[in-house]
Image (spheres, rainbow, N blue to C red):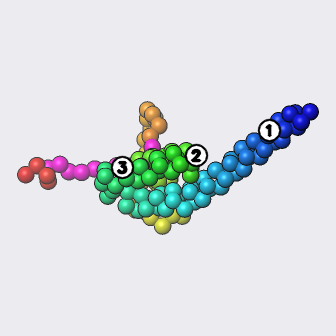
């Protein structure tokens, strides 16, 4: 009887520890995402194209270490963060109310629909004779 009672309380204690660990890990993930990853996203969207491979490797190492120590649940690399930031920015500037929507080229009128493209804008035409001198 005492053994069954001890096993029941050990099981309950184990469940409580598991739930508390999950809650702490979940809270750590929220704090890490909001403080660290959002700052990295903000900085990469502004100057990610100027980051060297060494700097990207350092940031990837910090993100990998955070995953290993349990601060975050999923691992995203600098390259993935840059791609998502670029896609979100391009999607945002396509709205007519955006402040830099006016500098986008005109929408291309095409009667043939071969495949879906990432954008429908007309690409600029360049004269190659100027550069051939």
**Element on which disc 1 rests:** helix
Q: Nearer the viewer, mark 1 or mark 2?
A: 1
Q: Nearer the viewer, residue 60 or 83?
A: 60
**Element on which disc 2 rests:** loop
Residue 76 position in % (x across, y down): 49, 46
| Residue that label 2 marks | 73
**Residue lying furthest front:** 2
Q: Main secondary structure of the magenta part?
A: loop
Q: Is residue 19 left or right of residue 67?
A: right
Residue depicted at 82% across the width and 35% down the height? 7
Q: Nearer the viewer, mark 1 or mark 3?
A: 1
On-image quarter of the N terminus:
top right
Label 1, label 3: how many angstroms apart (C-alpha)?
43 Å
| Residue that label 1 marks | 11
| Res. 57 mark | 3
Q: Earlier in the sequence, mark 3 or mark 2?
A: 3
Residue 127 position in % (x across, y down): 20, 51
- Is the Cβ of the residue at disc 1 closer than 8 Å to that at disc 2? no
Residue 61 position in % (x across, y down): 41, 49
Residue 123 position in % (x across, y down): 34, 49
Label 3, label 2: how many angstroms apart (C-alpha)?
20 Å
Residue depicted at 43% across the width and 62% down the height? 43
Residue depicted at 38% across the width and 57% down the height? 48
């Amino acid at each position: 009887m005492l053994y069954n009672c001890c096993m029941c309380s050990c099981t309950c204690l184990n469940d409580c520890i598991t739930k508390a660990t999950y809650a702490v890990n979940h809270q750590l993930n929220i704090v890490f995402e909001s403080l660290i990853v959002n700052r990295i996203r903000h900085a990469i969207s502004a100057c990610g194209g100027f980051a060297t491979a060494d700097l990207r490797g350092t940031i990837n190492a910090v993100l990998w270490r955070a995953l290993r120590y349990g601060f975050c649940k999923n691992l995203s690399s600098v390259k993935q963060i840059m791609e998502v930031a670029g896609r979100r920015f391009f999607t945002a500037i396509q709205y007519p109310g955006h402040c830099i929507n006016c500098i986008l080229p005109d929408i291309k009128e095409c009667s043939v629909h071969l495949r879906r493209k990432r954008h429908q804008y007309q690409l600029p035409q360049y004269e190659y004779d100027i550069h051939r001198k």
